[in-house]
């Protein structure tokens, strides 16, 4: 296995998908097919039928492009990242099954696995990735291991290879939410992961203006995910699919700039006495730096810091920013900052958060693609000069 299993480079795939036969007069940009339904009388009329079914041309186009980017057999584009996670779990489990998941997953995914699936007879055991006792948690009825790489918001990097090895032996699907890296930095399928979940709301869309999701994996799994999506109905609107495709065209250049800026910002924070800790996989001080180097083509645009002054210092820092915008979410061209104690980890006590490495004073930054020197100047003034 290597980091580069795709035939074309992600920069090329983001623009073209794959090589296509083009007829004279064809539009260079696929038109928006804003139609709920299609002229169709019998199965001989082809696959275009009804947009909730996921076979609108714009939906199919971004799905195919996502599969090429992830290096998987197939992919389906859905109405949100949570639709992608939920439809995946509905497709891969049924009552009586068991799931093993990494602790510290995205909050809504945790709720899905810890509260909603049990109501449907599917039990989940959470494993601390640092302790890594995956094998001990498995049961004969385990069907899925669900992981996230990198982990939000501590940006730890999990090695999928030992997990995949254990799962393969027992016919268990490994599902990885790889949103934070984007397929430019990290292609989970190249490391043996079966199913990749992306919140396309983030880097794939890239402009904080859409909600969308991708599931990429083997054709049999994607067919089943699509069957669930047809029933439960989280279809991607064609206009949003078109915007997602537009975002994917510039994914490679954007992500490279995110990577560069995040590195510069991380180094700046490392030099500040008012910053107790900087978490960025590109820093030598990061506990998983060597692993990130091996698995990833870039370290991403997310940087987390802990301010020495605790929660009050974090409130002041964010209130003083001129460029960085206080908002949840990530992966857009603009820099966003948030405090997990008010967003993803609001449901935990301060002690529980601290035990997960997220003390008060923890600030998560989605570093945008502005000029790095302007961002650093803004952060410096917001810290008091
Ligand atoms: C890692 C991760 N996965 C999934 C999601 C859910 O995506 P969406 O908001 O598109 O449903 C998010 C959203 O923040 C996320 O950060």
Image: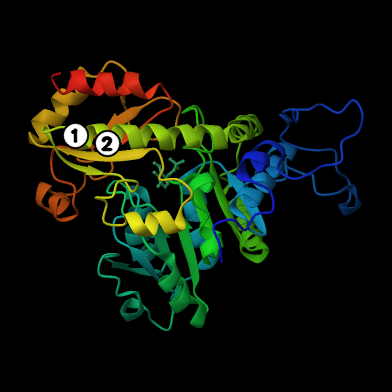
Query: Does 47 sit above or below residue 33?
Result: below
Badges 1 and 2: C-beta atoms under 8 Å apart? yes
Judging from the image, what secondary structure is the residue with disc 2 in? Answer: helix
- Give the residue drawn at x 85%, y 43%: 40
Disc 2: CA contacts within 10 A as few (<14), some (14-19) or many (>=20): some
Residue found farthest to the top: 322
User: Horizontal and vertical percent for residue 58?
Assistant: 70, 37
230 on left or right of 319 = right
In-front residue for pair 1/195: 1
Q: Quadrant of residue 342?
A: top left
Judging from the image, what secondary structure is the residue with disc 1 in? Answer: loop
Residue 83 seen in the figure = no
User: Horizontal and vertical percent for residue 332?
Assistant: 45, 30
Report which residue position mark 1 lands on: 271
Report which residue position mark 2 lands on: 267
User: Horizontal and vertical percent for residue 110?
Assistant: 33, 55
- Give the residue drawn at x 44%, y 74%: 97
In-front residue for pair 273/329: 273
- Give the residue drawn at x 69%, y 53%: 7
Residue 26 seen in the figure = yes
């Amino acid at each position: 296995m290597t980091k580069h299993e795709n035939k074309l480079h992600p920069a090329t795939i983001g623009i073209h998908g794959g090589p296509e036969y083009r007829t004279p007069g064809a539009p260079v940009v696929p038109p928006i097919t804003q139609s709920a339904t299609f002229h169709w009388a019998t199965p001989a009329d082809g696959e275009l039928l009804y947009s909730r079914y996921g076979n609108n041309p714009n939906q199919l186009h971004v799905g195919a492009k996502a599969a090429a980017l992830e290096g998987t057999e197939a992919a389906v584009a859905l109405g949100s990242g949570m639709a992608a996670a939920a439809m995946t779990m509905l497709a891969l489990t049924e009552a009586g099954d068991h799931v093993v998941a990494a602790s510290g997953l995205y909050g809504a995914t945790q709720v899905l696995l810890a509260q909603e699936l049990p109501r449907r007879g599917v039990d989940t055991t959470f494993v601390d990735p640092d302790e890594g006792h995956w094998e001990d948690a498995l049961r004969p009825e385990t069907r899925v291991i669900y992981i996230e790489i990198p982990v939000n918001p501590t940006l730890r990097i999990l090695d999928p290879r030992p997990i995949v090895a254990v799962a393969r032996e027992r016919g268990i699907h490994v599902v990885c939410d790889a949103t934070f890296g984007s397929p430019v930095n990290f292609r989970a399928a190249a490391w043996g992961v079966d199913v990749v979940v992306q919140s396309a709301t983030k880097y794939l869309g890239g402009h904080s203006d859409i909600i969308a999701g991708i599931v990429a994996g083997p054709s049999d799994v994607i067919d089943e995910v699509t069957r669930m999506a047809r029933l439960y109905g989280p279809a991607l609107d064609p206009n949003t699919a078109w915007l997602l495709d537009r975002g994917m065209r510039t994914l490679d250049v954007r992500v490279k700039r995110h990577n560069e800026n995040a590195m510069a910002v991380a180094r700046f924070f490392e030099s500040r006495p008012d910053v107790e800790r900087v978490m960025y996989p590109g820093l030598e001080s990061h506990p998983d730096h060597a692993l990130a180097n091996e698995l990833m083509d870039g370290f991403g645009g997310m940087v987390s810091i802990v301010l020495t002054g605790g929660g009050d210092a974090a409130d002041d820092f964010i209130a003083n920013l001129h460029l960085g915008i206080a908002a949840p979410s990530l992966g857009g061209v603009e820099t966003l900052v948030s405090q997990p104690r008010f967003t993803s980890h609001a449901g935990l006590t301060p002690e529980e958060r601290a035990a997960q490495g997220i003390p008060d004073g923890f600030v998560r930054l989605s570093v945008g693609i502005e000029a790095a020197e302007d961002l650093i100047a803004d952060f410096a003034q917001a810290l008091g000069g």
